[in-house]
Image (cartoon, grey):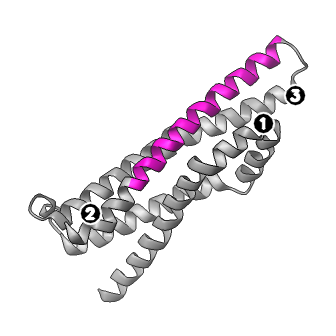
């Protein structure tokens, strides 16, 4: 059981740092920089998508959550200790917030980013005119929505990290 806990902890902490760090970086630094770069920023986002960022992050997030649930089930098999212990409450709260971040990120933000990218690519094939402008405007609207969702997910993951960091002292 000790080896399993060590493996789960390595997965949970290592992947959790990657997940939270990547999304906080993207929300606070990458997205505003890409937006400021204008059309050239779109190339950066395309390269990021081609490297599989939006495919890797859900897997990393899922493994982080599953390993966290695995560790929690070892220390609290009944999943009821959160009602009686500050430590368990902080872990359960952080875990719940991370699950909310996962759901928003995978089922709302990711499709929005993919749709915005597809619209922008399609618009590039359309001749200049109102049709192209309408597609580009819709792509921009979706990008703004994705940026807001990214900040929400980054904020939720920040809360998660803080809850996990202070759990021992609550």
User: What is the residue that sits farthest to the top in this orientation?
Assistant: 130
Q: Secondary structure at mark 2?
A: helix
Q: Is residue 154 magenta?
A: yes
What residue sits 68% from the left and 56% below the top? Answer: 52
- Is 59 in front, or is 116? 116
Looking at the image, is mark 2 or mark 3 nearer the viewer? 2
Q: Secondary structure at mark 1?
A: loop
What residue sits 32% from the left and 65% below the top? Answer: 164
Q: Is residue 5 magenta?
A: no
Sequence order check: which comes first, mark 2 or mark 3? 2
Report the side of 46 relative to 76 (left or right): right
Looking at the image, is mark 1 or mark 3 nearer the viewer? 1
Q: Dot 3, crowdedness within 10 Å: few (<14), some or many (≥20)?
A: few
Q: Quadrant of residue 95?
A: bottom left
- Residue position for label 1: 38
Q: Quadrant of residue 160?
A: bottom left
User: What is the residue that sits farthest to the left in this orientation?
Assistant: 84
Looking at the image, is mark 1 or mark 2 nearer the viewer? 1
Task: Give the vertical position of 97 relative to 87 (above or below).
Answer: above
The N terminus sits in image quarter: bottom left
- Residue position for label 3: 125
The C terminus sits in image quarter: bottom left
What residue sits 70% from the left and 45% below the top? Answer: 33
């Amino acid at each position: 059981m000790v080896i399993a806990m060590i493996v789960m902890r390595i997965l949970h902490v290592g992947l959790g740092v990657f997940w939270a760090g990547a999304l906080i970086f993207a929300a606070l630094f990458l997205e505003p920089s890409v937006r400021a770069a204008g059309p050239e920023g779109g190339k950066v986002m395309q390269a990021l998508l081609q490297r599989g960022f939006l495919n890797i992050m859900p897997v990393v997030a899922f493994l982080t959550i599953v390993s966290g649930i695995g560790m929690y089930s070892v220390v609290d098999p009944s999943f009821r200790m959160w009602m009686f212990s500050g430590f368990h409450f902080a872990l359960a709260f952080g875990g719940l917030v991370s699950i909310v971040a996962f759901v928003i990120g995978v089922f709302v933000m990711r499709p929005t980013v993919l749709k915005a990218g597809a619209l922008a690519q399609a618009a590039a094939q359309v001749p200049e005119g109102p049709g192209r402008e309408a597609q580009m405007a819709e792509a921009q609207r979706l990008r703004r929505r994705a940026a807001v969702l990214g900040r929400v997910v980054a904020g939720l993951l920040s809360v998660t990290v803080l809850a996990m960091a202070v759990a021992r002292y609550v």
